[in-house]
Amino acid sequence: MRILFLGAPGAGKGTQCKKLASKYSLAHLSSGDILRDAVKNGTQAGLAAKEFMDKGMLVPDNVLIDLFREKLAQPACSKGFILDGFPRNLAQAESLDGLLSELKANLDKVIDLKTADDLLEERITGRRVCPNKACNAVYHIKFSKPKQDGVCDLCGTELSHRSDDKPELVKQRLSVYHELTSPLIEFYRGKQLLATVNGEGEQEQIFADILATLN
């Protein structure tokens, strides 16, 4: 099973991808995690990416594709995988098609988690994270409160509000997402791979809807 998740920031992609990966023993491939791992392990693509990151530049699409090529060639992905956060635009989607063709693989389903912008804004701006890198727990001031206000339940570290989760930046992030991703939705709809799932409501109901779509 090879699945790609689309969804705006705050749509809950990461949560649902982890649940699905656990249920079906699939590799969960987040672009951010792959990038960090490749840099940490000093792979060829990781070293190339680090050059751009050290200069404060975005990692180019061709380097991102090389990162995914390294990852998808590993035995852990042979049983299937879930792509989370990649591709982000049409050019990346076309490059991914080429890579999958090289690997004699193909996507089985593209799931678009559809969520209203006002709910996304509420989810994102209320998010609080544990800055302890060994923990990385995530909370929400309304939907998932810590037992003690402002303190991580797991490690006791004071929670922080990420700078890109501030209200003034959230609208901009959502606008950029819609601009880049609208062509992606049409791209995968044209391939008859796209399924839209309501991303609003309880996590378990959303997960049940995803399973129903896949089955």
Image (spheres, rainbow, N blue to C red):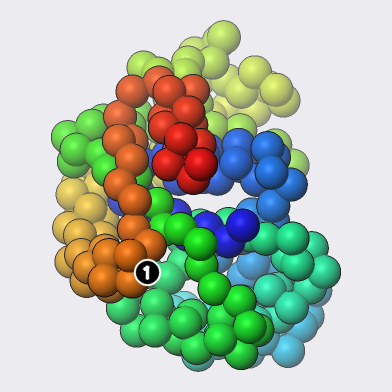
* Image quarter of the N terminus: bottom right
Q: Where does the image place residue 140, in percent across and percent down from the top left? A: 43, 24
Q: Judge whether 49 appears above or below 10 on screen.
A: below
Image-quadrant location for residue 49: bottom right
Q: From this viewpoint, is residue 123 visible?
A: yes
Q: Which residue is outermost to the top?
A: 147
Q: Residue at x 33, y 65 (%)?
A: 192
Q: Where does the image place residue 38, in percent across and percent down from the top left? A: 71, 74
Side of 74 where 127 appears, left or right:
left
Q: Judge whether 109 appears above or below 37 on screen.
A: above
Q: Where does the image place residue 174, in percent across and percent down from the top left? A: 23, 53
Q: Residue at x 23, y 32 (%)?
A: 119
Image-quadrant location for residue 6: bottom left
Q: What is the three-letter code of the residue carrying label 1?
A: Arg
Between 175 and 69, the one lying in front of the other is 69
Side of 46 where 93 appears, left or right:
left
Between 19 and 60, the one lying in front of the other is 19
Side of 161 where 38 appears, left or right:
right
Q: Judge whether 201 appears above or below 68 on screen.
A: above
Image-quadrant location for residue 78: bottom right
Q: Where does the image place residue 41, in percent across and percent down from the top left? A: 80, 74
Side of 178 where 103 appears, left or right:
right
Between 186 and 68, the one lying in front of the other is 186
Q: Judge whether 161 appears above or below 92 on screen.
A: above
Q: Residue at x 68, y 74 (%)?
A: 72
The residue indicated by pointer 1 is 88
Q: Residue at x 30, y 47 (%)?
A: 196
Tag 1's secondary structure?
loop
Q: From this viewpoint, is residue 184 visible?
A: no
